Image: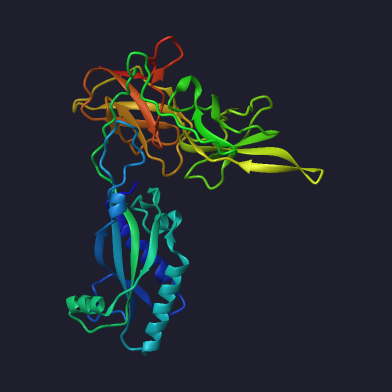
Amino acid sequence: MSDENVIAAVTKTLSGLILGALADIGGAGVDTKPPNELAAGGADKLVNLYLFQADVDGDLRNADRLDLAPGETGDQPFPLVLHYLLTPFVRRDPDSVAHKMLARAVRVLNDNPVLQRGELSAFAPDSNAAEQLDRIRITWQPLGEKDIYSLWSAFQTPYRMSVAYEVRAVLIDSHRVPKAPVPVLRRGRDDRGPAALGAVPLGLPVLDAAVPPLNQPAARLGEQVVLRGSGLAADSARVRLSHPLLADPVLVPVPAGALTPDEARFTLGAAGIPAGLWSAGLELTGTVVEDGTPRQVVTVTNETALPVAPTITSLPASVSRAADGSAVVDVVYTPAALSGQPVFLIFDGRAVAPDPLGAGTHLRFTVPDATPGEHLIRLRVGGVDSLLIDRSGPRPVFDPTQAVTVI
């Protein structure tokens, strides 16, 4: 997630990194003016960081959003590629000082090819650029003679030694909320959708799917998950749960008797398991005999998707409609979202962002234009919704505890 301040945030972060690299050169600073305005300034020693061009990242422009469930629609974040010109400017000292400043700037950008979240937060606290999932990368951009001539002719100033860098991808999120319709209860007469089967025996352990209980679209903390596949026979096994916002995987032992050649069963514990889109794999430990000597071998399977759903633990049965037509809904949920995970309340098919006053597992949502009557509620954390459908009975029904009446 990143807002309209993301371009300025990238410029501030680059300027801050370069300024830190110039600390041993007395009086040196960083500016972002057009190069033709440098001579009119008062500073004698500058490294000028000028944003001279912005392009669209074609690959990301045509990619689907990662945080939308099937059947939902929403505008893709606008992906930009920023082009910066780096020019040392020295008014009175010899050119060797300018060369030294340019080398310092090039060195710090080479040492920081990816803008870290901590750097973006420190240099640009007024933007949430640090929360976008795609990393922002810095790449050297070669300039040919025609490029140099065109740029400096446009600046209408004498040429100075310069280098160029490309920064991608910088995402600007849309203000238009995504559309999230209520899910379908049945698919056809027997609730069987289309199926395509195909299998090629490989002789290696392979996972096909992670199946939550009752064929739910996601698992909740404390529930048992079944990893189905083939060739899973082993002496012991551990589940590897990986999340894109966590540096290390979470390892969960498979209990004795819960491992067969076709499946592995484990319970989704609470420690270190936030809601969101996870990947589940298996570490299989078996015994092989070589030259009459047994030894243990660990085999790691492929990974399969495992959505982990948040659980709404407290929801008001009814809320009052304000004079402007809005309604405030307080939601308590578990587990708490990670920093950088988007959180929305799906209310009447609309995705509503939380108010800034909420924190932790207690969030407040102001729903505009809330019509009177009963509304089904879902909480979406990291692209995964709380479970709205109760499948424990003979027929799937909507969970009555996840509804709010606007009065």
* Residue 196, horizontal then vertical, whole percent: 40, 29
The answer to whether one can see residue 22 in this image is: no
In the picture, measured across the screen, residue 121 lies left or right of residue 348, that is: right
Residue 80: quarter of image: bottom left
In the picture, measured across the screen, residue 118 lies left or right of residue 351, that is: right
- The quadrant of the image that shows the C terminus is top left
Which residue is at 35% across, 46% downward? Answer: 1
Residue at the farthest right position: 292
The colour style of the image is rainbow
In the picture, measured across the screen, residue 362 lies left or right of residue 72, that is: right
Of 84 and 45, the residue lying toward us: 84
Which residue is at 48% across, 27% downward? Answer: 219
Residue at the farthest front position: 200
* Residue 73, horizontal then vertical, whole percent: 27, 35
Of 268 and 370, the residue lying toward us: 268
In the picture, measured across the screen, residue 86 lies left or right of residue 204, that is: left
The answer to whether one can see residue 257 in this image is: yes
Does residue 213 sit above or below 340 in this rendering? above
* Residue 65, horizontal then vertical, whole percent: 32, 42
Which residue is at 27% across, 24% downward? Answer: 348
